[in-house]
Image: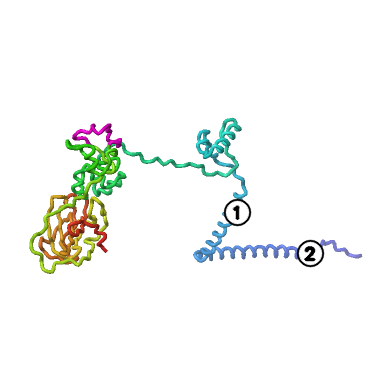
Amino acid sequence: MLDVDTTTDPPATGTLEPAKEGNSGLTGGLESALARSFAWLACTIWRWAGDWRGLRPLLTRTSAHLGLIVVALLVLGLSSIRWPVLAARPTSSVPVIFAQQSTPEATADALAEVMANNGLPPQPNTRAPITRQADPHTIIPLRPRLEVITYTVQAGDTVQSIATRFGLDPTTIMWSNPAIEDAPDLLRLGQEVVILPIDGVYHTVTEDDSLGSIAEKYKVEVDAIVNCTYNGLESSLSIVPGMQLIVPGGEKPYVPRVVTSYVGSVPAGARGTGLFQWPVLGYISQGYWYGHRAIDIAAPTGTALHASDGGFVSFAGWTDIGYGYLVVIDHANGFATYYAHMNNIYVTAGQAVERGQVIGAVGSTGWSTGPHVHFEIRYEGVPYNPRAYLP
């Protein structure tokens, strides 16, 4: 009898084991790749964190290029957009439109355009680019003064500067004020100055005056005085003593000032060369003109003052005619130089001086509105423009 073994053999598993090994290999490879990736990322971050200064140039260049690209894209995008007019130009009224026309034909065309638009001014094109509207500037002309006024002298004022302020000639200021006429270059702070509306002479009528004598004195015609609207004259018989008249275009003769000079003996060898130098370094605050036969050289108080040429001192001291402390040097060749408004005097009358020698210090004595030296050059007693002799 054949024995049959009924024992059940375990199922074959040889075919399943290779599959388990394949899945384990895939999972192991993925884990290994992830581990290597995390390791590389960690190393990279650690390297960048440790050497971030070395990467700064690269990051800077990269960000700059990206910024340029973004700006270029924005410009291209905005340029392709058709923008509406943000603000309409202001419209002009009908009278303004007509006022801006320069010819009758242009005015007629503008009127026809307004009537075609139901009486309204032309409307601007809302799609047109914004343009600048014509806005002519109106210059208001200077109006002449209608009366005589007064001005108070301030620090630094000169006859020339006052005349320029009011659009007059310096001689008009001088011939309208007796105190200034006596010493045109010597003003006093707070002094009241008469200002005429036009150029000329301001004359006070006396008992012996007539329009004919006044006109002859100032070298003008009688009609110039009578026809001057500022005088309000109706005839030659209407003037009375004490009346003040404006003489348009009138002139007065020049009278130089004279100081007492040294009368002693002349020191031996005290003679000038005829070549003059600047007495002090500074700027010219008042030039040479009819009523100021000198130049004023402004400089700080106490600045050394030098003899312009050699000679001897013919005057050194105080004057009562506005010069203040004055030094006069006689150069024994017909020339003499004047140095006025000095603060200190270092020479005496009769003393010989050399060219360039210190004779005093700049000041503001006498009738002066600021520190300067009033410098004159006279030849045979006649004052000439010092700029013609100075280098």
Local SS, label 1: helix
Residue 342 falls inside the magenta stretch = no
Whether residue 122 is visible, yes or no, is no
Q: Position of residue 369 (x, y in %)?
A: 21, 49
Whether residue 225 is visible, yes or no, is yes
Q: Residue 15 has which mark?
A: 2
What range is drawn magenta here?
226-244
Label 1 sits on residue: 73
Magenta span dominant secondary structure = loop
Q: Who is closer to the viewer here, 194 or 280?
A: 194
Is residue 70 toward the left or the right of residue 365 in the image? right
Residue type at mark 1 is Leu
Q: Who is closer to the viewer here, 284 or 129?
A: 284
Q: Position of residue 136 (x, y in %)?
A: 47, 42
Neighbours of disc 1 within 10 Å: few (<14), some (14-19), many (20+): few
Residue type at mark 2 is Thr
Q: Position of residue 106 (x, y in %)?
A: 56, 38
Q: Position of residue 190 (x, y in %)?
A: 21, 43
Q: Going from the N terminus, do you reach mark 2 or mark 1 first?
A: 2
Q: Determine the CA span between mark 2 and mark 1.
A: 64 Å
Q: Is residue 120 above or below residue 371?
A: above
Q: Nearer the viewer, mark 2 or mark 1?
A: 1
Q: Quadrant of the C terminus?
A: bottom left
Q: Residue 149 has which mark?
A: none
Q: Who is closer to the viewer here, 293 or 48?
A: 293
Q: Who is closer to the viewer here, 387 or 371?
A: 387
